[in-house]
Amino acid sequence: MSAIGPRQVSADEAAALIRDGDFLIVGGNGGTGVPEAVIEAVERRFLAGQGPHDLTLFHVTGLGATTEHGMCHFVHRGLVRRVIGGHYGPQVPFMALIDNNEIEAYNFPQGVMTGLCRAMASNQPGVLTHVGLETYMDPRLGGGRMNPRTEEQLVELVTLPDRERGMREWLLYRVPGVPKIAIIRGTTADEDGYVSMEHEATTREELSIAQAVRNAGGIVICQVERLARRGTLHPQMVKIPGYLIDFIVVDPNQMQTFGTRFDPSRCGETRVPTSSILPDPMSERRVMARRAAFELRPGDVVNLGVGVSAMIPNVAAEEGIEDLITLTVEAGVIGGVPGHAREFGTAVNPRAILDQGYQFDFYDGGGLSCAFLSFAEVDAEGNVNVTRFGNRFAGAGGFINITQNTRRLVFSGTLTGGGLDVAVTAGGPEIRCEGRLRKFVRVVDQVSFSGHLARSKGQEVTFVTERAVFQLAAEGVVLTELAPGLRLQEDVLDRMDFAPLVSPAVKPMDERLFRPGPMGLRDGFLLQAARAKVAR
């Protein structure tokens, strides 16, 4: 870096800095904070025959909008040799390279990936954690390797003392190499390269990435929306000091997310009334989100996953309980009403936006009250698969960090899939066409969540479907609720590959779930809060 600050270059000039075989770290999180202009330029240069080739690509979690943007720009044979990522769901074309065994590929938990950024910055050997034991991250179950081409083991099983339980097993996720290039993003850069993130909906781990690459003698490229005069940025708004930045790329049209050009309520610049957030249409997915919301308690600090779980904030807003709980997402956002689809990872009216690594420190330490997640498969042991199904290996994201460290868990998903058609009526669900695929199976294809480990730790686990609710007990999966109007045997048990235990006190799912309009959860919340206050 020049003594007079970083050099401003075009996106194409920045792409030309990447050499064959480089270890490249790309910042961003899902659909937010992605340095899209520079990534597009890398693709253009490669397609023009100018390289680079055989990159090692590191990204903390999936970057893209399912079939476009983000890592979808890297779906060209010869461009990437190895990838290490926390999630691949938002980059479906890139998954094809992995499924076809064309590149080496690893998937590690999202919280571990944030830790690896900090480990590279501080020249540590890796991340030592309990996260991933008894899942496919465990080297005894694959070590996070995604296809046969991926041979090197980057996860080690070690035994070390625990401060409470004596000797126990841990996993050491090794630093996967020496980073040479970073492509990150912010909002404003001054003439000395100091970068602020006032329009960003998440702040991610861009600082750790820049530190890692700078300390390794590499090149840090930062894409921003605008420039400012030297020294005019408020020091508390600056997230990356100028001495870490080598090159600045200005893209005045960069999107806040892949769904929104700029929404000031997602970065804290303004607040909008929650009354402006319209209820989602009634569907089987909304029924599940509403039933899952019954598991909330006043004062809960909650994590919300993708899929059905991402619809719970909409339920909370309609019920008027968003001020009685704290909703969080792993990207670092706290409070407000989290978004879903292309807005996942952000929130309307956030109360705080932390760097992602600090969010995972809290999660991994057991700070969450409860968490809401999806499932693709559940088996008789209570194991859950969300990571590999069919020819898709989406990866874990923050799922393993969250599920292994939260006492109360609620998994949501339809009982069957593949062509399922459900009508929601005031009297309950009407199954118009049954799904071809069974989700409650004898043995899951991949263990993303260990039922055995959950039982040994005393976790409370609930499975919510559109037609029944199950609990994980010491003796296995137990059916506890049945939707009104449905038959236990024909509509539920005959659609499962294993026979769950059936509670002798099976009760109907609450009829309010199937009717439009608020269900009155706020009154119940206030009553619980008053009782808890008296008990104290």
Image (tube, rainbow, N blue to C red):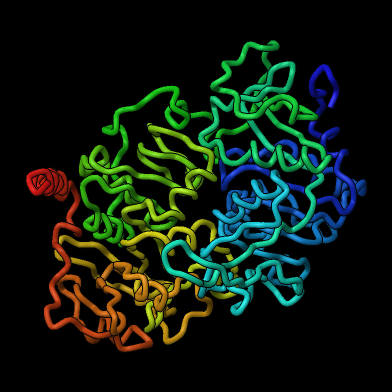
Q: Position of residue 357 (x, y in %)?
A: 54, 45
Q: Is residue 234 left or right of residue 222?
A: left
Number of marks drawn:
0
In this picture, is 173 found above or below 185? below
Report which quarter residue 28 is drawn in: top right
Dividing the image into 4 quarters, which one contains the N terminus?
top right
- Residue 465 can be seen in this image: no
Residue drawn where x is 76% and y is 67% of the image: 104
Q: Residue at x 47, y 29 (%)?
A: 267
Indicate the position of residue 524 as horizontal and vertical percent values. Answer: 11, 49
Q: Residue at x 35, y 69 (%)?
A: 414
Q: Is 36 above or below relative to 61?
A: above
Please, which residue is most extreme toward the right here?
Answer: 50
Q: Position of residue 450 (x, y in %)?
A: 44, 74
In this rendered view, identify the residue nearer to me: 86 or 72. 86
Residue 495 lies in what quarter of the image?
bottom left
Rendering coords of residue 39 (x, y %)? 74, 42
**Left or right, residue 33 beside residue 72:** left
Residue 93 visible: yes
In the displayed structure image, the side of residue 392 where residue 154 appears, left or right? right
Q: Name above or below for residue 329 compared with residue 488.
A: above
Q: Residue at x 17, y 67 (%)?
A: 509
